[in-house]
Image (cartoon, coloured by chain):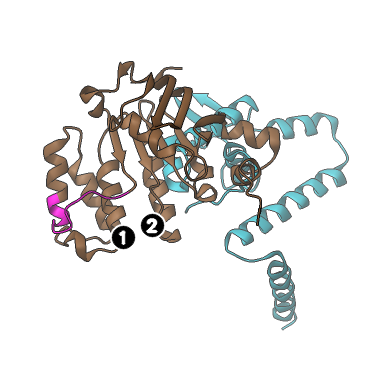
Chain colours: A brown, B cyan
Amino acid sequence: MESILRCTNLSKTYGHFYALSSINLTLPKGKVVGLLGPNGSGKTTFIKLAAGLLTPTDGGIEINSMPVSVDTKSLVSYLPERTYFNKNAKVQDCLDLFEDFYDDFDKNKAILMLADHRISVGAKMKTLSKGMQEKVQLALVMARRARLYLLDEPLGGVDPAAREYILNTIVANINPEATILISTHLIYDVENVLDDVIFLKDGRVVLYDTVDNIKTQRNTSIDALFREVFVCSRNY
Amino acid sequence: MLWTFQANRPVYLQIAERIIADISNSKLVSGAKLPDFRAFAYNIGANPNAVAKAYQYLVENQVLALVSGEYIVLESTQAEQAEEPEAKDVADDTNIKQKKLCSDFIREMSDLGLSKKEIVTFLCNYMVEENKNQNQ
């Protein structure tokens, strides 16, 4: 199967701390992949490396067989943990920014998604709640026709009723050429739309398998497996 | 309508089972065309890959056939073919059907948000009322 992302011996250190150590990973095209792990396991670092916002300390990362660079950024649609829009901008201004910035941006699709969330394009970002701002950001990111979507905690501030809608928009976008990587703690909400899961622990990949394999072999949910692998014990 | 899935079993299997259930209760008749997997996935809120895998699984099990790019419900399922020539114990078949109907009923009621206890209560009340109506 053709791959969209490949990393070899990928490491990233912050000072002496290894955020990621020697990751070898290949993501196929046309899949929805969950990047799961507890806080501080390296999920955001991994996504930022793939988005080209960080440079590896060691090893390499390729998107569509090209090293991560300015060129690969046009293939990658990245949803950061926090929204980066000017708080004084209107939703319309953000739409214009994306249209100006990305050739693959489908403005009409974004407007339709915003309408589904009842977000007016005339609203100022600062008048929207945190969850609404995240929905604006997600609509913009998903309205691009990218090859790789990197979604860092797309459901964090969103209410449970809207999560279902958002997941549907996310999976509706997948096509044989596009892969979606979702990092999240809300495993129960996402596991039924995932094809594959990656478990990260202390900067290393401890599991990478298809969801169907895991469920068939272990007869358990991904949520339950996650709790088993990353069990927290009380030491006080 | 969005479908809900159990978290401890592969989604494609659950989709395949629902399609089989729709065939056995004649919501889907033989010769019917199934929608394009992408459209179907969109309607039920599932990953298109899971629907594609479910269709593939049903083709392998001779429930569906892939005819010029479209998935068609086959005339008789493998299960029925196996039962007919042997003329197996009729009571046994009925029992299977009853179990199937019950499990479908419970699943659909659960999807509506009822607990198992509530389903039992609802069914009892319903039967009592229906009895009354018939006696009138």
Q: Position of residue B64 (x, y in %)?
A: 58, 30
Chain ID of residue with mark 2: A
For mark 1, what is the residue?
A130
Q: Does the residue at mark 1 contact the one at mark 2 (Cβ under 8 Å)?
A: yes
The local secondary structure at tag 2 comes to: loop
* Neighbours of disc 2 within 10 Å: few (<14), some (14-19), many (20+): some
The local secondary structure at tag 1 comes to: helix
Q: Is residue B52 left or right of residue B8?
A: left
Tell me the quarter of the image containing the C terminus of chain A: bottom right
Residue B44 is a magenta residue: no
Give the residue drawn at x 68%, y 58%.
B106
User: Which residue occupies the foreground of this view, B26 or A10?
Assistant: A10
Give the residue drawn at x 50%, y 30%.
B71
User: Which residue occupies the foreground of this view, A213 or A53?
Assistant: A53
Q: Position of residue A114 (x, y in %)?
A: 25, 54
Give the residue drawn at x 70%, y 30%.
B78
For mark 2, what is the residue?
A157
Counting residues from the start of the chain, the first of labels 1 and 2 encountered is 1
Q: Is residue B12 left or right of residue B90?
A: left
- Whether callout 1 and callout 2 share a subunit is answered yes
Q: Position of residue A224 (x, y in %)?
A: 64, 46
Q: Label 2 sits on what residue type?
A: Gly
- Give the dominant element type of the magenta stretch: helix, strand or loop: loop
Magenta residues span A82-93
Q: Is residue A187 left or right of residue A135?
A: right
Q: CA distance from mark 1 to mark 2?
A: 7 Å
User: Which residue occupies the foreground of this view, B74 or A165?
Assistant: A165
* Neighbours of disc 1 within 10 Å: few (<14), some (14-19), many (20+): some
For the image, the number of numbered tags is: 2
Asked whether residue A148 is in view, the answer is no
